[in-house]
Image: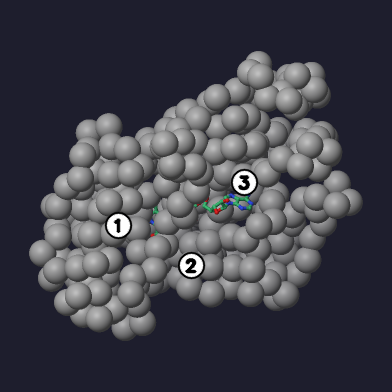
Amino acid sequence: VNRLPWSSEFAKAVPDAKWGEPMSAHTTFAIGGPADCFVEAKDIETLKRVFELARKHRLPIFHLGFGSNLLVRDGGIRGIVLKLGGEFNKLEKLEGRRVRAGAAVRLPRFVMFCAEHDLAGSEPLVGVPGTVGGALVMNAGTREGEIGPLARVVEWFDPERLEAVSKPASEVKFAYRHSDLEGRLVIGAELELSVGDKRDIMRRVEALQRRRAQTQPIHTFNVGSVFKNPPGRFVAQLIEESGLKGAAEGGARISPLHANFIENHDEAKASNVLALVERARAAVRERFGLELELEMKVVGEPA
Ligand SMILES: Cc1cc2nc3c(=O)[nH]c(=O)nc-3n(C[C@H](O)[C@H](O)[C@H](O)COP(=O)(O)OP(=O)(O)OC[C@H]3O[C@@H](n4cnc5c(N)ncnc54)[C@H](O)[C@@H]3O)c2cc1C
């Protein structure tokens, strides 16, 4: 336990909290400095304790999913990083065509669960490695479909009342890689699928996986698309035509396979990735007069 003014009280209340945990171990980029305090909450009781102490000591809480859309800066994250596990990892088939998924469930597992139950419609999400919680907050998806339209009920943890609350997904605003859930801790959702046939669903899943493996560097340390596509344009093409495919800064490079991916190929720092982000922005601004907007989230402190 380190020497933060709140750490001994916190460690008593949440004994399995980790101190100075490297975020590089919790992001698909394998990049990121230490979190002051890292908690994996397995139940609502733990959430209550964490949020109560955070309120008492005015500590920021960062909600971590699978870290598959995240660049954590080299100085790490102050306060608490909260990840969900345990009971938030449950999947349940409900009446009709509905599935309840805990926020910690990862999308490929969710898609397979739906297929097992002859439920179709989630296939476009099979190659998105994040969690149901992270996907709802980001409205993750592909050209073939997003998660938002499948959601019927969204549950989150209310930090004031210290309890779980839910609301109809029709009251949530979903947009391109964005929702107004941002800032709330999503803990689960009910999603509605359509009736399908397991074999057809698996055929579509395999076709989507094959296409992804051919067009994206899925076996490298990355966070998927770095920038959002501007209306009617593809960022990958804009960056490629700006001559930056393969460009490197330290151990980071713009993927030679897909120019909207940045790869950590050799112990890259967050600062290396950010330098590439700025180079890509400047080049696309100069050549096309377009301002690129980040899709990945950048959090934490500089080194
Ligand atoms: C190889 C690869 C391919 C990808 N392909 C796609 C794709 O096709 N389409 C796509 O949309 N994305 C894609 N991504 C990006 C990523 O998987 C999605 O954005 C995903 O939704 C992020 O989920 P996560 O759980 O990893 O969230 P994180 O990266 O951990 O967090 C992302 C944001 O969500 C917030 N958050 C996470 N969990 C919660 C929660 N429970 N409650 C509240 N806030 C939360 C975080 O605070 C943060 O702001 C890809 C990534 C990789 C590595």
Q: Residue at x 49, y 42 (%)?
A: 301
Q: Residue at x 62, y 46 (%)?
A: 63
Kind of residue indicated by mark 1:
Val
Residue 269 x/y as whole percent: 32, 38
Q: Which residue is mark 1?
A: 277
Specify which label sits upstream in the sequence, 2 or 3. Answer: 3
Kind of residue indicated by mark 2:
Arg
Specify which label sits upstream in the sequence, 3 or 1. Answer: 3
Considering every residue shown, the one lying at the far right of the view is 161
Q: Relative to residue 66, is residue 233 drawn left or right? A: left
Q: Which residue is mark 3?
A: 63
Q: Residues within 10 Å of mark 2 (few under 14, many from 20)?
A: some
**SS label for mark 3:** strand
Q: Is residue 149 above or below residue 188?
A: below
Q: CA distance from mark 3 to mark 1?
A: 24 Å
Q: Which residue is mark 2?
A: 177
Is the residue indicated by label 2 positioned so its CB lies within 8 Å of ligand 1? yes
Q: Residue at x 22, y 72 (%)?
A: 284
Q: Relative to residue 15, is residue 191 drawn left or right? A: left
Q: Is residue 241 above or below residue 44?
A: below
> Is residue 68 at least partly visible in the picture?
no
Kind of residue indicated by mark 3:
His
Residue 58 x/y as whole percent: 76, 42
Specify which label sits upstream in the sequence, 2 or 1. Answer: 2
Q: CA distance from mark 2 to mark 1?
A: 18 Å
